[in-house]
């Protein structure tokens, strides 16, 4: 099944994204910080990562840089969602395939996700 990692310290946002993506046929895994996401990446191999910018310990750009430097995870597409620092993500097209400001349009996010990684509906 197509797996998406959602990284956000705002659990309500992570849950909303998770429920919406699962309704579309994706398997989701959530992490509340960049460090927890990195621990999840040790055991999960997601086809897409959606991350917040501002999180405790490791922000979304730091997480993305670490993912990009990894030998097997480096090509995984990443989406950044941010309340106020979206411009920092836009300045890094080497890290993110898309940047959304919070609050985000869930339908636009779902459409982008489908274009990047189709759900495995088998």
Image (spheres, rainbow, N blue to C red):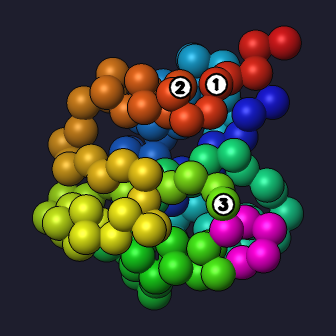
Circle 3 sits on which residue? Answer: 75
Q: Is residue 94 visible?
A: yes
Residue pictured at 50% horizontal, 33% vertical: 113
Circle 2 sits on which residue? Answer: 114
Label 1 environment density (alpha carbons within 10 Å; few <14, some 14–19, many ≥20): some
Say which mark, if any, is on residue 118.
1
Precedes in sequence: disc 2 or disc 3: 3
Q: Nearer the viewer, residue 9 or 85?
A: 85
Q: Nearer the viewer, residue 40 or 96?
A: 96
Q: Position of residue 121 (x, y in %)?
A: 76, 14
Q: Which residues are magenta?
A: 70-74
Label 2 environment density (alpha carbons within 10 Å; few <14, some 14–19, many ≥20): some
Q: How many marks?
A: 3
Residue pictured at 76% horizontal, 21% vertical: 120
Residue 73 part of the magenta segment: yes
Q: Position of residue 67 (x, y in %)?
A: 62, 73
Q: Position of residue 83 (x, y in %)?
A: 19, 59
User: Please, which residue is most extreme toward the front here?
Assistant: 94
């Amino acid at each position: 099944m197509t797996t998406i990692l959602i990284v956000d310290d705002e659990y309500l946002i992570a849950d909303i994204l998770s429920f919406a993506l699962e309704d579309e046929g994706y398997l989701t895994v959530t992490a509340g910080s960049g460090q927890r996401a990195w621990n999840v990446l040790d055991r999960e191999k997601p086809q897409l990562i959606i991350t917040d910018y501002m999180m405790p310990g490791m922000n979304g750009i730091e997480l993305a840089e670490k993912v990009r430097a990894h030998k097997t995870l480096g090509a995984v597409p990443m989406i950044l969602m941010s309340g106020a620092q979206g411009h920092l993500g836009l300045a890094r097209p080497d890290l993110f395939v898309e940047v959304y400001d919070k609050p985000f349009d869930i339908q636009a996010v779902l459409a982008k996700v489908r274009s990047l990684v189709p759900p495995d509906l088998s």
